[in-house]
Amino acid sequence: MPMPDPNVVAIIPAAGRGRRVGGELPKQYRPLQGKPLLWHTLNLFEGCPVVQGIILVIHPEDRALCREQVLGGEEGFAKVRQVVDGGAERFESVLAGLQATGEADEIIVVHDAARPFVSAALIHRVIAAAVRYDAAIAAVPAIDTIKEVEEKVVVRTLPRSRMWCAQTPQAFRRELLQEAYSRLTPGEGATDEAGLIERLGKPVQIVVGEHKNFKVTTVEDLAEAEWRMSKSGETEKSRDRRRVGQGYDVHRLQSGRDLVLGGIHVDHPRGLEGHSDADVLTHAIIDALLGATGLGDIGRQFPDSDPAYKDISSLILLESVGEMLSKRGVEVLNVDAVIVAQSPRLAPYLGAMSDAMSRVLHLPSERISLKATTTEGLGFVGREEGIAAQAVALVDL
Ligand code: MG
């Protein structure tokens, strides 16, 4: 879903006492893989590019605990801009967080401290839906049949196809959420923010949530959370941040030019036609890297209308793409490419090509895999009218 860049602030209510899990510590401070549950949840929002700031709502008695165990770590959380005291009920805590927001905050996204498995993609989708519809929540279709019960006797069975279980994130335009809270009368409460919006008679958009985004409530949940984190932990996080890109390029063969592939001069009677040195392999790799990072393509970064790039070595362009990526903190995990040429035989050059690329990208050469193939005489490659190259790149954002 395309969206402009709204100002988004996350409110994380973490003031509950979490009695149902038992033990000395409130559940949000219970360790999972060596870090408090709350730390894991904050870490997800810290790493979420669409969220600009975080307001953390805690119990006043937990100040020291939170500072030492959650916020005081070596990395800290740059996005946590306020830590405010919450109330006895969850909706009071969210209200305390809301009161700490300002005019510049357009979208408020509320997320339970005890849901440490939400994906960045779901956070993004809920925010995008709130930008479009003003109010949106993550929810999953009910799996079990839901009964309405009084005094342990079923009153009726609700139509399961219409039943959804609400999760967080829940995201709203700030004014709308403020209006909903302003209508709250003493003694009234709400188990989630969406309930307050519904009372205003305003529609709340559903975004299909994730079953893995469960709320850690009981001792069994805590054990399940521990198991999930030990199983996937860091890999889950890094999988969310990995991106693949592809590149494809073709250049025409022409007499009177040098053939340059992967930055290496290849002995051949003809070379490739183009504005730069027409290094078709390097171009495909550049496009794969730019694609994986969402930076467009080679034509956008280095327009061929620009005389600066006339006959330039494409390795210089590749080097500058590498710098562009590293400035953004993007790590190239690997590149795999194939040159499609009828002749000459390229195998003897492939090692030198990957060495040249590894130098400009500051990557070990084993992360750059190069291959060459012919098309068995078929098509434009087979007729030796041109050379093609195709590449994929995997990056860690
Ligand atoms: Mg090209």
Image (cartoon, helix red, strand yellow):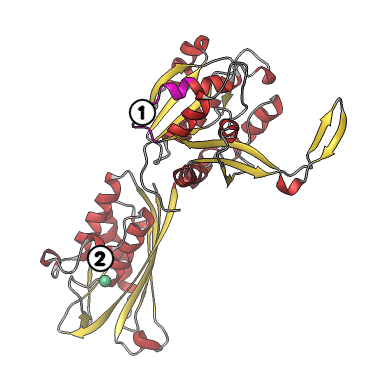
- State the predominant SS element of the stretch in magenta: loop
Task: Determine the residue located farthest toward the right in the rendered image.
Answer: 153
- Residue 58, image x, y percentages: 50, 17
- Residue 281, image x, y percentages: 30, 69
Q: Nearer the viewer, residue 10 or 39?
A: 10
Relative to 245, say whether 40 is above or below.
above
The numbered dot on residue 127 is none
The magenta stretch spans residue 177: no
Q: In this view, does 59 lie to the left or right of 47?
A: right
Circle 2 packing at 10 Å, graded few (<14), some (14-19), many (20+), is few
Q: Which of marks 1 and 2 is nearer the N terminus?
A: 1
**In percent of the image, x 24 and y 83: which residue is there?**
253
The secondary structure type at the circle numbered 1 is: loop
- Residue 264, image x, y percentages: 23, 69
Q: Can residue 36 be seen in this view?
A: no
The numbered dot on residue 78 is 1
Which residue type does callout 1 highlight?
Answer: Ala
Relative to 69, say whether 359 is above or below.
below
Task: Determine the residue located farthest toward the left in the rendered image.
Answer: 307
**In percent of the image, x 59 and y 16: which residue is there?**
186
- Residue 116, image x, y percentages: 55, 33
Which residue type does callout 2 highlight?
Answer: Gly
Magenta extent:
96-106
Q: Nearer the viewer, residue 319 or 21?
A: 21
Circle 1 packing at 10 Å, graded few (<14), some (14-19), many (20+), is few
Q: Is residue 372 left or right of residue 40?
A: left
For label 2, the residue is 299
Residue 51: image quadrant is top left
The magenta stretch spans residue 100: yes
